[in-house]
Image (cartoon, helix red, strand yellow):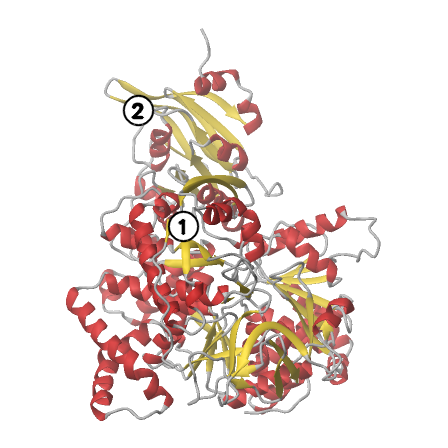
Amino acid sequence: MQTTAPTFPRLLLAHAEARPEAPAVREKDLGIWQTWTWNAVAQEVREMACGLASLGFKAFDNLAIVGANRPHLYMAVLAAQSLRGVPVPLYQDAVASEMVFMLNDAGIEFVIVEDQEQVDKLLECRELQQGQEGQEGRPSGIRHIIYDDPKGLRHYEQPGLMSYEQLRELGRAFDTANAGYYDRAVASGEASDVGVILYTSGTTGRPKGVCQTHASFIAAGRGGVETDKLGPGDNIMSYLPMAWVGDHLFSVAQWLVGGFTLNCPESAETVMNDMREIGPSYYFGPPRTFEGLLTAVSIRMEDAAAPKRWLYAKFMALAQRVGADILNGAPVSTGDRVMYSLGNLLIYGPLRNVLGMSRIRVAYTAGAAIGPDLFRFYRSIGVNLKQFYGQTETCAYVCLQQDGKVKLQTVGTAAPGIELKIAEDGEVLVRGVSVLKEYYKRPDATAEVLDANGYFHTGDAGVLDSEGHLRIIDRAKDVGKLNGPAGTCMGAIFAPNYIENKLKFFPQIKEAVCFGNGRDEVCAFINIDFEAVGNWAERRGLAYGGYVDLAGKPEVLTLVAECIAKVNADLAAEDGMGETQIARFLVLHKELDPDDDELTRTRKVRRGFIAEKYAVLVDALYGGKTEQYIETQVKFEDGRTGAVSATLKINDARTFPIVKAAA
Amino acid sequence: MSNRKIGDVILDVQNISLSFGGVKALTDISFNVREHEVRAIIGPNGAGKSSMLNCINGVYWPQQGSITFRGQTFKHMNSRQVAEMGVARTFQNLALFKGMSVLDNIMTGRNLKMKSGLLAQALRWGPAEREELQHREFVEHIIDFLEIQAHRKTPVGRLPYGLQKRVDLGRALAMEPQVLLLDEPMAGMNVEEKQDMSRFILDVNDEFGATIVLIEHDMGVVMDISDRVVVLDYGKKIGDGTPDEVRNNEDVIRAYLGVEH
C-alpha cells in the first residue's frame, strides 16, 4: 500500500486509518511473538508524544534514543516527529565519554533509553555534563531519562527518571486535558522539517550530526519500496543499530512508506533463531553479517561427514557456475537447470533455511564493499542479494541494483531522483532528493561537502561504466599510489580496501589492514578469526592457550600465508592491480576493536589510527626485520584496561608475476 | 540497593553441632537470617560452610541444636518439607540434567507447584495443559530475567560453565523461593561472569524479594553484596556482623591471613 503523506507521523496515521488491524510491529517477548497493529502503534505514539509534550518537549527539540531495536524506541522516533521534534538515535554501545559529546552537540534534554545499562550510562553522562559547568555555550544538559524496561530500576531515585508506562500515563492525562493538541501538532509538521539527526560514525575526527528532512527520507524510502515492490505482507528483521542510517532507511522510512511489518528480535544473541522463525521476505545487513553467516556455515560444513562434504562441494561448484545466471534470468542449458533444481532440493534450500533466508525475496547489503566471492555465494544459492550504495548524508540511497541487472563488481545505477557525477579526481558526486540538509550546527563542515551546484561530495572514488553502473573502488582519501621504480610518486594505484576485502573473504581472516601509499610495496596486518581458526586448530589437534598464542602459531602463519598467496595470484591477474600484491605480512596479537578506537562503531578500520598506534610494527614490516616485540593497551568491556604483549613474526608472502591482459 | 526493607528474623539457627563419626564438622553454631537480607557464610576450605547449608536444607541432620524457620522450630529439617516451605538452593558442583534443555531444566524447578498428575500431564489433558502453560510463562520470565533467551533450547551440557551456573540459579528461582541458598555461586568464574552473577543475585534479592544465604570464597564479592556475614573456621563461628565489622575482626584476619605466633 502506498501513501502519499508528506511526513512520517502522517504516514503512520494514514496506515492506521486504512488498515488498523494489520500487523505493524512484532517483538519476541517471553518466547512468544507479540504483535502491535497499526492502530495500536498510532495509539501508543500518540500517548508517548503527549507525555513528552506534558514534560515540556516542544517543536524543534531533540530527543535522544539509545537502545537496541525495541518497538517502543521506534515509536519514540515517531513520537518526537509528531511534535515536530527531532529524534536522535545514538549507538547504544558507545561509552559515556563518547556519548556525552553527541548529547552536548545536539543540546539533548530528553532521552529515551532501553534499560538499566543505558540509564546508568546516561546518568554517568549527566555527571560528566555537570563537571563541564562554566564552559561557554554549554547546553542545559539531560533533564529527563525515560526507560523502556524497568528491570533493576525500581530503587533508582535520581531526579528526572521515568518509566515508559509513567510517560504514557502522563500522555493520556495530557491528551484528555488538551484535546486536539496532538492532531494540531501532527498537522503542523512539514515535509521540509528535519526528521532525524544521525551521527556519522566518524572514520575521521569527531562525529557530525547529519540533518535529514522528512522529504528526503520519504523519497529515499519510496524509491526503495517501488524498486522492489514492497508492501503489506512483507516482513523485515530489525536488528542493526538504530543509529545507523541503513536501519533508519529500512526500519523507519521504508516501513512507513511501504507499510510492511517490522520484527524485533528477542535479544542480540537470538537474531539467527528469531530470523528462522519469522522467515523475513526482505533482509538487509552490512557485508560483515553476510560474512559471519558464511563463516558459520563453512565451519559446520568442515565438521560434516565426508559424503555430505562431497555433495556440498559438488553442488556449490554447480551453483558458482550457473546460480547467478539463473537468478539474473540469463540463458542456462537445460541439463544445468535440472541439476540446479536437484541441488535446490538437496543443498541450497536447506542451506537457505538454516540461514533464515527461505522466504527472502530481496536482500540488500551496504555500508562497505562486499567481496565479489561472498556476493556470488549468496546469489548462487538463490538469495536475491543486491547492493545499494549511499552514506548517512544521502539517506544511504544513491545507487540501487535493479532486479535482473545485477553486476557483481558494481553497486548499480543511480536510484530514482538521484543524479550522479564523477569528479576529475575520481570522487563520486551526488545531487538529488536524498541529499542532506546540513550538518547540525556545523556550517563549516556542510560547506566542505556541499558545493555551490548542490552536489554532495561522497569522498568515495568510483567509476561509471558504459551502462551507468557505478563501481566504487575505495575511499577517495584512502586510494594512494605506490612509489615508482625511481622512488617517484608515479607507481601503481593502491586501493587498500579492495585488497583487504579480498583477504576478508577467507573465513580464517577476520580483519585486514593494508599499507602501501607512498611506499615501495604493499604490506598487511592480519587479524585471524578466532572461531574459524580455533576450530581449524582443534581438528588438527593443535593445542593453543588463547588468542595471542593461536595467532602466533607457525601453522596458523602458514595458513594465512596460503590465503595471501591466493589473493596475490588474483591480483596478478587483474588489470592494474598486479603491482599491489602483498609483499610481507604479520598476524596481529589482538583483535582490532572499536573499544580501542581501532574500528569505528560500524566496524570499519581506522587506517590512520592503526598506522600510528602500531607504527613500530609498520616500521618492522618495511624495515625487513624478521620479528618485532610489541605491547598494547587494551580496554575491556567493563572499562578496565590491561596490556597484551607478544613477539610477532614478520612473514614474506608469495607473489606472482603480473599477467598481462591479452591485448 | 540500600533502601530494601530488611524485616524480622526468618531463619534462626541455634547451637547447631554436626559430626561425622569422630570428625566435628560444626560446633555450636548460632546465627540468624532476616527477611530480604543477603547473608553470607564465609570461611577457609573445610570450615563447614557447605555442611551448614546442608543442615538448613535438610540434607544433613545435626546431632544438636535447632533450626527455627518462620516461627516453627525443628530439631532437624527434611529436604522435601524445606522445599515446600519455600527454601531453594543451588549447588557448588552443579546438579543439572546435562542432556536436557535449559528450558526443561528450569521447568523441573516448578515440579512442586504442579497440581496435575503424571498421567494427565502425559496425555496433555486440558487442565494439565493449561497449567503447564502457566508454568512455562513463569519460566519464561526467569529466562528473560537471567538473559539466557538465546540458549532456551540448548542442552545444558553444551553451555559454558558460567551459563550453567545461571541455569542452576534459574531452576532455584522457579520454585519462587522465600529463601535462596547459594553454594559458591561464583566459583570458577572469571571477573566478568562474577560481576554478572553479583548483579543477578542483587536483582533476585530486589525483584523477587527473596532472602539470600550465600557461601562464597571471593572476599571482594562477599563484602560488596552482603548485608551481614558469618565467618566459620574449623566448624566454629569466629565472626558475625556487617562486612566492615568482619573485615576488622582480629580472629577473621588471623584465620584468613595467618598470623605470626
Q: Farthest residue toward the top? A: B261
| Residue under numbered circle 2 | B63
Hey, which quadrant is residue A327 in on the image? bottom left
Mark 2 secondary-structure assignment: loop
| Residue under numbered circle 1 | A587
In the figure, is residue B253 to the left or right of A302? Answer: right
Q: Nearer the viewer, residue A389 or B231?
A: A389
The residue located at (41%, 67%) in the rendering is A578
The residue located at (46%, 18%) in the rendering is B257
The residue located at (32%, 45%) in the rendering is A553
Quadrant the C terminus of chain A occupies: bottom left
How many angstroms separate mark 2 from mark 1 (CA)?
Answer: 64 Å
The three-letter code of the residue at mark 1 reads Val
Mark 1 secondary-structure assignment: strand
Q: Residues within 10 Å of mark 2 (few under 14, many from 20)?
A: some
Q: Farthest residue toward the front? A: A486
Q: Nearer the viewer, residue B82 or B229?
A: B229
In the figure, is residue A109 to the left or right of B207? Answer: right
Q: Residues within 10 Å of mark 1 (few under 14, many from 20)?
A: many
The three-letter code of the residue at mark 2 reads Gln
Rendered location of residue A140, percent (x, y): 79, 57
